[in-house]
């Protein structure tokens, strides 16, 4: 469908990488949009790092300065993701 009344919305892809060493809160280690986001994702895939897609959470996390721990307001959301990843890793170990 085309026409003058048609609106197109383009969302910018934002990627955030976190590091969690089981001490303290996870730390933001990389953020990026566009081509940089793609490179972060490619490097994560190459390293076997699980990738979770959550545009709203990525947008919130992208405001955290590099090297800083995530803020307490995001603990619950990140905890749910960590539980998912840990269960995924456990099931992969059990299968091998």
Image (cartoon, rainbow, N blue to C red):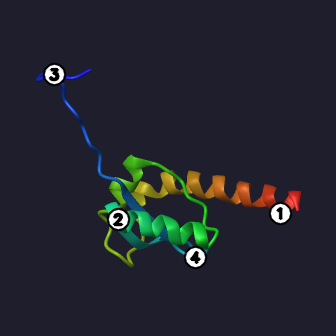
Report x, y in % for residue 80: 57, 51
Mark identifier at residue 93: 1
Q: 8 or 15, which is in the foreground?
A: 8
Q: Of discs 4 and 2, which sits in the foreground?
A: 2
Q: Which residue is mark 2?
A: 35
**Which residue occupies the extreme front position in the image?**
2
Report x, y in % for residue 24: 52, 74
Q: Is residue 57 above or below residue 32?
A: above
Q: Earlier in the sequence, mark 3 or mark 1?
A: 3
User: In which image quadrant can residue 7 be found?
Assistant: top left
Q: Which residue is mark 3?
A: 3
User: In which image quadrant can residue 94 be found?
Assistant: bottom right
Report x, y in % for residue 11: 29, 45
Q: Earlier in the sequence, mark 1 or mark 2?
A: 2
Q: Of discs 3 and 4, which sits in the foreground?
A: 3
Q: Is residue 83 above or below residue 43?
A: above
Q: Which residue is mark 4?
A: 23
Q: Of discs 3 and 1, which sits in the foreground?
A: 3
Q: Under tag 4, what secondary structure? A: loop
């Amino acid at each position: 469908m085309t026409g003058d009344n048609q609106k197109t919305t383009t969302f910018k892809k934002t990627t955030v990488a976190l590091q969690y060493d089981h001490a303290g809160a996870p730390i933001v280690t990389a953020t990026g949009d566009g081509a940089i986001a793609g490179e972060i994702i490619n490097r994560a895939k190459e390293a076997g790092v699980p990738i979770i897609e959550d545009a709203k959470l990525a947008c919130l996390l992208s405001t955290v300065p590099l090297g800083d721990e995530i803020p307490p307001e995001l603990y619950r959301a990140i905890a749910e993701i960590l539980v998912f990843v840990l269960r995924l890793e456990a099931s992969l170990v059990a299968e091998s």
